Amino acid sequence: MKENQFIASREKEWLAWDLWLKTPRQKQIEAGQAAEAAITLENLPSAFRRLCHDVSLARDRRYSSVLIDALQQRVLAAHQRVYGARGDLRGDWLDFLEAGLPRLVRAEWRFVLASALLFFVPLLLCLMLAQIFPESVYYILSPDEAAQFERMYAPETERPGALPSAAADGQLAMLLYYIGNNVRIDFQCFAGGILFGLGSVFFLVYNGLDIGMVAGYLTRVGYTQTFWGFVAGHSGPELIGAVLSGAAGLKIGYALIAPGRLRRREALSEAARGAVRLLYGAAFLTFCAAFVESLWSPIRSLPFALKIGAGLVFWGALIVYLCFFGRGRHAA
Amino acid sequence: MKKGCPVLATNAEKTIPRLDTIRRVRTPEGCELELRLAGGVVRARAWIIDFLLRLLILVGCAFVLSQIGRLGGALLFLLYFLLEWLYPVVFEVLCQGATPGKRFSGLMVLRDDGTSLDWSASVARNFLRAVDFLPFCYAFGLVTMGLNRENKRLGDLLAGTLVVYRQTMTAPKVTDDDRKEEVPPFALSEAEQRALIEYRLRAPGFSRARAGELARLASPLIADLPPDDARDRLIHLGNRLLGRGALAAKTEGSR
């Protein structure tokens, strides 16, 4: 069959495809019923197979590349419409928060545990070290930084935890500053995983050391009330958020180091799917933390015991959430 | 075909993997699609366009927001954050896999199997910019693109995505109405037929001198004809192969 004969015999259906591909997704069903000889829900599978067959025929018979390209573009566009799953979080994000995230954290408990150890061990070590050897602070913080933190949490300060420059801008500015800063840390912990996990390990340990030393230093100086009162509320979601993003990075790194029976590249994209969901969870927790940090934490009129108590309740609630939610009737 | 004809495709083509940027994807229907991968330069161009666009938005908003004082500063920070991290994700998922820069450069992002991006894949590939960007000017990303066959930067490797050229469906049609046919003097191989068809489709777009020059390359087919006649001869052969005969006159007219 010559090329133009082929075109003449099949063109009608190709035009129907063009019409179908041009119609927006929502209107496709109604439009399909309206137009005659068009692509409808009933004949879509067979029509699509015929279209694919046309490409193969055209290629096998060495028709002009113009025709082959045009047919191929139709197949590609239809392929994307038919198989392109989209919006994997759109419908079920509530379900993800209620059950999906805790389940995911429990399923990936090895990475979460490793990430938590990499983060909290240096943090606690530094906290203790600062009590025993006060001068060790300067291995991690420069004198300027130490002085700045001291100013931020001095008992007479009006808004603890605020940078002097940002403090004047009010709560919204602080909220945005916290979100930006913490999310950046999360992304670094996540993206560092691609370097065989080394980047994630580095950022987890580094941030652990940094946070631990600041806490140790301020405790040592005697600003217990301002500092611990300030951080108690938001420390839970913020630190767990960092741990989860670190776990996501470690999962990626592990897929590169030990891909198992898959090829490294396949193991990587397999791991990415779970890792990105962990990152969603981390971003959610970090977002919550920023709200607590800018709205609840700076209130100075509340008694110290209440703020510590609230902080412990937050921690407890978070641990209960991650350990026990999503079990039971929904469990797969 | 006589030996030494340049139209002839060599057998080496069949044994040595071709050094091109076409990637083949199989659909579940058993159809093989060809995607043309984009290289570093055109992707850098798309990135620069996006960068300038973001800069423009940021500067414009900074100008407006600076009028409303401290709150403006905070909002500007938020805007910077959103433009930095969510701009590519939102555009790639909602606008057929292309940020404005990519659209302008004729590129789009697809998953390895040819389907469009979902949120997870877009988040993975764009948040890894934090590493691809290191140590300066996307050096990691460019080096990684050179190390694999599919021009993937680290983010693409992680997310399993490809950056390909967006192809348009508007095919250049045969515009002239030269319908004369000639039968080839000897049997032509498939590659030769294909080359002739391509020539026939493109020849009206060349200058006559260039078309004649190209026609001279198919020496066994044109014998000693002068360039202009050689061109016409090849076009007539192409018409024969395309089937632009009596039937074609009918269908071409109705299109």
Image (cartoon, coloured by chain):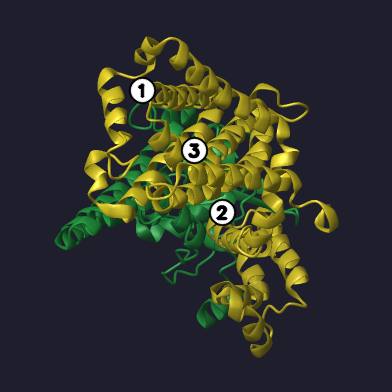
Residue A191: image x %, image y %?
Answer: 51, 34
Task: Report the Cα–Cα distance between label 3 and label 2.
Answer: 18 Å
- What is chain A's hue in the picture? yellow
Which of marks 1 and 3 precedes in the sequence? 3
Residue at (27%, 29%) from the top-left corner? A148
Residue, disc 1: A221
Mark 1 crowd level (few <14, some 14–19, many ≥20, 10 Å Cα): some
Rendered position, B2 above or below B144: below
**In the displayed structure image, the side of residue B148 where residue A91 appears, left or right:** right
Relative placement, left or right, of A30 versus B6 is right
Could you tell me which residue is drawn at 33 percent across and 41 percent down? Answer: A160
Say which residue label 2 marks. B119
The residue to which callout 3 is attached is A186
Q: Residue placed at 50% from the left, 64% from the top? A: B169
Tag 3, which secondary structure?
helix
Q: How many marks?
A: 3
Point out which mark residue B81 bears.
Answer: none
Circle 3 marks a residue in which chain? A
Let me know if marks 3 and 1 both belong to one chain. Answer: yes
